[in-house]
Amino acid sequence: MTTAGASEGGRAPILLFRDIDEPGLNTLEVYERRGGYESLRKALAMSPEEVLEQLKASGLRGRGGAGFAMGTKVSFLPKGAMDKYLVCNADESEPGTFKDRELMQKNPHLLIEGIIIASYAAGANRSFLYIRGEYSLQADVLDAALLEARAAGYVGAEILGSTHSLSMVIHRGAGAYICGEETGLLDSLEGKRGNPRLKPPFPANQGLYQGPTLINNVETLSTVPAIVAMGGEEYAKLGVETSTGTKLVSVSGHVQRPGNYEVELGIPSREIIYGLAGGPPDGRTIKCWFPGGSSSPVLTAQDLDVPYDFNSMAQAGSMLGSGAIIVVDDSTPILNVAMKVAKFYRHESCGKCTPCREGTNWTVRMLERIDAGEATPMDLEIMASVQEHIIGNCLCVLGDAMAMPIGSMIAKFKDEFEAHMESARVHNGLGASAASDTALAAQGAFDA
Amino acid sequence: MSTPEDVLRAARALELEAAQEGLPPRPIRRFEHGSRAPGWDAPADLAKDPAEIPDPALTPVPEDLRTEIEAHMANYPDRRSAALPALTAAQRVHGWCSPEAIEQVACVMRVTPAYLESVASFYDMLETSPAGRHSVYVCTNISCSLCGADELHAEMLEAVGADPEFSVRSFECLGACDIAPMASVDGVYVGPLTLADVPQLIDDVRAGRPVLPEKQLARRLVADPHANTREFPEHPVEGEA
């Protein structure tokens, strides 16, 4: 990992994406030539507690969605000699998110180095990298990189002559969104259906094979070498107070330059959507945007100046989530957006908890009723109340992940839903009579 | 505790009662998703023993498959962790998770076939019914559908027609919204696709050529203009000279 200093020319440093397209970066040779695995040597020269202190000082928050402080998470693991596990969550399935894919495909050794350092800090001797089955190219790249790292003595027994040993297994999933949820992932890794578990006990105490387990996202772990290289306090100077560092943002949907961008947390969202990604196509305006994947409540064009960081997004009534911005312009009816989101969660609900299993299903059906012209305005209220009854009532947050965006769409685009309902009713709904009523009303027939 | 027989007896009694009062028999409620599993509404025969772990002497397993599954099992503290990689390997051999494939995996892993069936039915990439040799997943999630993925999916289905070699299906977010609308063709990501690309894509697969090499994800450079400090060439993709 090359050490990048503080801001260069006013712009934030690029920590994860620096020269990421350099040919051969996925090989050990080029990675080492660029200073790779130097952070690991530096970390192994410190005590695990000192590495942990650096992670805590960095203020690094989890990049997978929940935004939990990574250093704190590591410190939750019990001390003492026992089998402890580190699991890297590479089941990147949140719609709109594709940052980990690019990172793993182009710079696999950065992730492997991050896993080794984090396992040293946590005292874990076994690590598993759970990558979604669809990412076969990325898994192949990681497999090759892991072979090289093993041969070079970075992974295995007594790494670089230290007392720390680590095994690493790359485990390919087989297509299930719920396996991105940490306890669902653990069940899947144990060879079961990926059903989430009741918490507590939290994975830090009882996780994989009932042992203490640290679970972190790819981007979080890939940031660790940079933190060790530059020092936790130096890293904490990047970004804003409650959201330190840089973040990979995946921008997609109705933008001219979709893709991954590394930004300093706290920059205005407008700068990402318009400045970097080019905004919606000419002549169109933004109707709404998801700031953190399809699970985050939608924001509108009025929220474009909200700083892009964890707390500001929460204050604006949404969340930073996985850092995936999906832009929807005014050419798309909001009902279509809601339908896509709801159908996705209906398909991916594991079916364990009733509010999620039934709530996602009925939400889709009610949206279909609206589209078919069979709904009444009361249906919107029922649909909103269904969302409220899902939130907080399940083992995991999959149901909430549908309820929050759908609820926010109903609240913010109520007029459009009602207009859609009315026009659908007139055009293809149950009532031809209703249509003639409307026609009569238009002619003023019902005026006193 | 009521056994399935009790439930049936109670249901028949209700039917009889209805018939005596001259009412039409009450229909048994069926749920559309229930019909996915054949025999879902048949009562379980609790007297029957569950299928046991297959007998190695009576279950021939291809040697390559056995070696691969055993290698996976050795990776984990608990052999059951190898269920997903093992089923994926068996699917590669058999084309889908057929009863025979499940039987063979169960035999090597020393678990019951029912356990593996429960796992296989959970994951989208494990096929529980016969599937074509070539899988085409068209992402139809939010970002791709905003860019026209639903039309692409329809076009793809039409272009393939009744060809049994292909399984074209819509898939949840494949994590490549930067190349929306996109598809994963036998695991290779291609995009952004237009409707005009579809015939070429199908032809490439039929001919065994690399699929649309100029549109493969693997060759793309990062979108962030600040990431690369120097100019780099596009990445080479497999099959290119």
Image (tube, grey):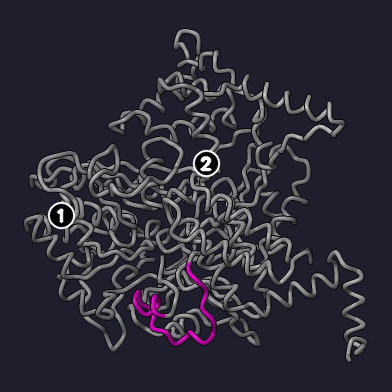
> Dot 1 surroundings within 10 Å: few (below 14), some, or many (20 or more)?
many
* Residue A311 falls left or right of residue A414: left
Give me the residue at 60% from left, 60% from top: A342
Q: Is residue A82 left or right of residue A369?
A: left
Is A298 magenta? The answer is yes
The x and y percentages for residue B223 are: 46, 72
Q: Which residue is mark 1?
A: A121
User: What amino acid is labelled 1 in the image?
Assistant: Ala
Q: Quadrant of the N terminus of chain A?
A: bottom left
Above or below: residue B23 compared with residue A423 = above
Q: Which residues are magenta?
A: A296-315
Q: Is residue B229 visible?
A: no
Q: In percent of the image, x 20 and y 55: which residue is there?
A: A118
* Figure quadrant of residue A417: bottom right
Q: Write down the quadrant of residue A322 in the picture.
A: bottom left
Q: Is residue A73 magenta?
A: no
**Mark 2 packing: few (<14 Cα in 10 Å), some, or many (20+)?**
many
Q: Which of the labelled discs sits on residue B123, or is there none? A: 2
B31 lies left or right of A3: right
